[in-house]
Amino acid sequence: MKKEKKLFTMVIFTILLLMPKTIQAATVPVYGYGYAKGISRVSYWIDYSSGTGFYEYLIINAEHNWENPGWTSPVNMVAASSNAGTMLDIYTKPNSFFTSNENVKVLGLTEYFNNSGNLVYPEDQTYAFTRIHINDDTNHNRNATEVQGTIAHEMGHAFGLAHVDDAVSYNKESIMGQSWYRTVQTVQPCDTDALYRLY
Ligand SMILES: [Zn+2]
């Protein structure tokens, strides 16, 4: 009897000890600001002239993943045939666009702009539109599921989500984890939770 109680106490203690850490690790940080127009109708355009058509089905998969992750999502995206007034434009670029160091292998990059087309930072202000640049050199021959994960990750940045860089224990189960430690390639509940906090 006494032994059972001790075990019970130990289990409770262990759960309490683990809980705050788990909750903290599951939280996906935001930069601070998001799209001025929100994310209920994100118009997006694919730059076919730079070869982005190669990634079109993965872009659409990532879009559908954000819209219907398996639970309620605040995201809705609409494809546009021109980039006039669109909120998200997707380009493909060679490795040299991302870095002058050929040893550095960037997968993608998201940029933020105001109404005048000037580069802004999502830590400072809301933004009118974003650009996602897919590195064709690092992604062209990569596993399709992982490329889709990278595109969904960059879309998360476009919405205003930051990396889940917890140096103590990386949250591996968030699409906002970086590719080298992320164990998931799809949107997780903690990712949509972060959007509901931001918008
Ligand atoms: Zn990232």
Image (cartoon, rainbow, N blue to C red):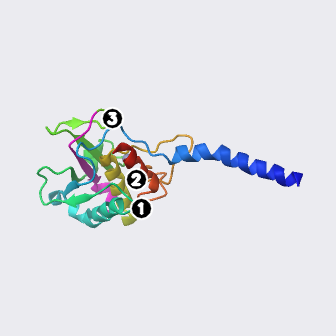
Residue 138 part of the magenta-drawn span = yes
Q: Could you tell me if the residues under marks 3 and 2 are in contact, i.e. CB atoms within 8 Å? A: no
Does residue 135 appear left or right of residue 7 in this picture?
left
Q: Say which quadrant the C terminus sits in.
A: top left
Residue 51 is tagged as: none
- Mark 2, ligand 1, within 8 Å: the answer is no
Nearest to the observer: residue 76 or residue 101: 76
Q: Which SS class for mark 2?
A: helix
**What residue does disc 2 label?**
192
Q: Is residue 152 above or below residue 126?
A: below
* Distance between mark 3 and mark 2 Cα atoms: 19 Å
Does residue 177 appear left or right of residue 122 in this picture?
right
Q: Residues within 10 Å of mark 2 (few under 14, many from 20)?
A: many
**What residue does disc 3 label?**
123
Q: Could you tell me if the residues under marks 1 and 3 are in contact, i.e. CB atoms within 8 Å? A: no
Q: Nearer the viewer, mark 3 or mark 2?
A: 2
**What residue does disc 1 label?**
71
Q: Which SS class for mark 1?
A: loop
- The magenta segment is 125-140
Residue 1: where, in percent of width, then height? Answer: 88, 55
Q: Amino acid at mark 1?
A: Trp
Please tell me in which quadrant of the rendered image residue 125 appears.
top left
Q: Residues within 10 Å of mark 1 (few under 14, many from 20)?
A: few
